[in-house]
Amino acid sequence: MTAITIDRLAVDETTLECDVRASPELERFFTNEPFRTDYDVSIERVPDGVLAIPVLAQVCPVAWANGADVYVDEVDATFARALEDVQETLCGMYDFLEGGTLYARRTIDPEPPARGDSGLLFTGGVDSTCSYVRHRDESPTLVSIRGWTITPDPSDDEKWRHLTDRVSEFAAERGLETAFVESNMLSFLDHPMLLAHYKRYVDGAWYSSVGHGLGLLGLCAPAAHARGMNNLYVAATHWEGIDLEWGSRPDVDDRVRWAGTRCHHDGYELTRQERLDAIADYVESDAPGLELQTCNARMDGNCGRCEKCYRTAVGLRLSGLEPADHGYPFDDREYDRIREALENGEWVLGQDEKYMWEDIRERAREVEPGSPAERAFFEWLEAADLEELVSESGPPLTHRLLRAGARNAPNSVYNALYPAWTTAKAGLRIARSNR
């Protein structure tokens, strides 16, 4: 029987820890670490059925990819039904997902939190800042998570400090509460092996393409219950008309729920440029000094040189804001640099970036260029074949070969070679980020 079992669930004030046991054919997808999450609020009075949600939200997609069942002692009944709904969405999205069944000794219907508060997953980027602007009358608690783009590894401590400082300052200026969550959700899972097996089926990585909507929201469940959150928002990355296979979509996030708390995929009706418009209106009315943080390379400000920085800076200009006033060093000389990088395939782009540059192109048709350099760039963008630019970018051949080798290795061989695989993968990632 192919199965994943949640063996132990323990709480020590603000820390949740549990063991996960997988049948032999699934062991390669897990490391030897127990699952662990640290909150900044006591979760000792949170029912076990809610405490089980964070780990279930991480392991269930792995089970569904292998037609495996999941066993747990106790689970919140509302979340158990939510898992069925999310499984339906993800299995309909991806042919390689086979599905599975959750078996619980007990299902519970705990008393829901009574405060009626809201929470918002927040990084300070375009999407989450727009969601704050849209829901600022609710004074949402800003929830930031360490464990995905910022790893639990000590080497990322400084990045996490930069993020928490920035979010705390943003919250303090607006009289908001913060909630910081730290988890090893992607190191207790063997993410390189998941990538080796399933990258060929998805446009991005495992977590971005499959797991992060359910995973990040589920991770928040104990803190949301302890803090009395009835609504939890996660900002949309894409928008209506973009039918991409992606782990966070309305038909995933809007279906996630547990006792007293509903999750919401927010801002899906707005394109990224329209979200920048909403931010521009907020800047004009309330926050002239607002700075965004979207950089792919650093967390202590924006590098101004990566694809996401350039894309955001151009979008800010199209919304009537000067990028340099909001965190992006940018002048007209950068337009030639953007064109060169796109034409030479210097950035690894996916279909979502293609849609975002198309969104910029649509807006540029409506706006009078502010300079000859801007006019020349938008004329080039109008004629550019963005589909071709995306298809010519991608991971190097050596990276694809490493994934294929890891995917096909027997467990005993893979376990012996795992350190070399992760070292090589890290080296490729560093080389790519320095391009």
Image: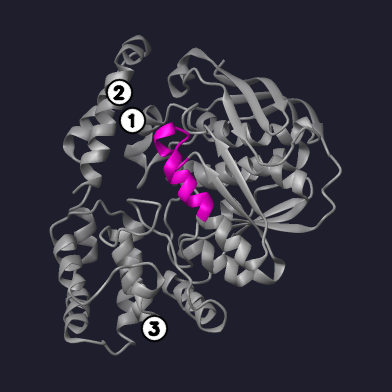
Where's residue 370, x and y in %?
A: 26, 87
Residue on which the image places disc 3: 320
Give residue 266's mark: none
Give residue 196's mark: 1
Where's residue 185, x and y in %?
A: 52, 33
Front residue of this view, candidates 187 and 321: 321
Q: Which residues are magenta?
A: 148-165
Front residue of this view, candidates 253 and 272: 272
Q: Can residue 122 be seen at all in this image of the molecule?
A: no
Q: What's the amino acid at mark 2?
A: Ala
In three-dimensional space, the C-alpha distance between marks 3 and 2, rounded to whole angstroms, equals 49 Å
Number of the front mark, 3 or 2: 3
Q: Residue 48's quadrant in the figure?
A: top right
Q: Is residue 283 left or right of residue 427?
A: right
Please determine whether, in this image, residue 134 is positioned above or below residue 178: below
Q: Secondary structure at mark 1?
A: helix
Q: Which circle's residue, 2 or 1, is located before the other in the chain?
A: 1
In three-dimensional space, the C-alpha distance between marks 2 and 1, rounded to whole angstroms, equals 6 Å
Dominant secondary structure, magenta? helix
Q: Residue at point 49% right, 78% down?
A: 288
Q: Which circle's residue, 3 or 1, is located before the other in the chain?
A: 1
Q: Residue at point 20% right, 66% down?
A: 338
Residue on which the image places disc 2: 406
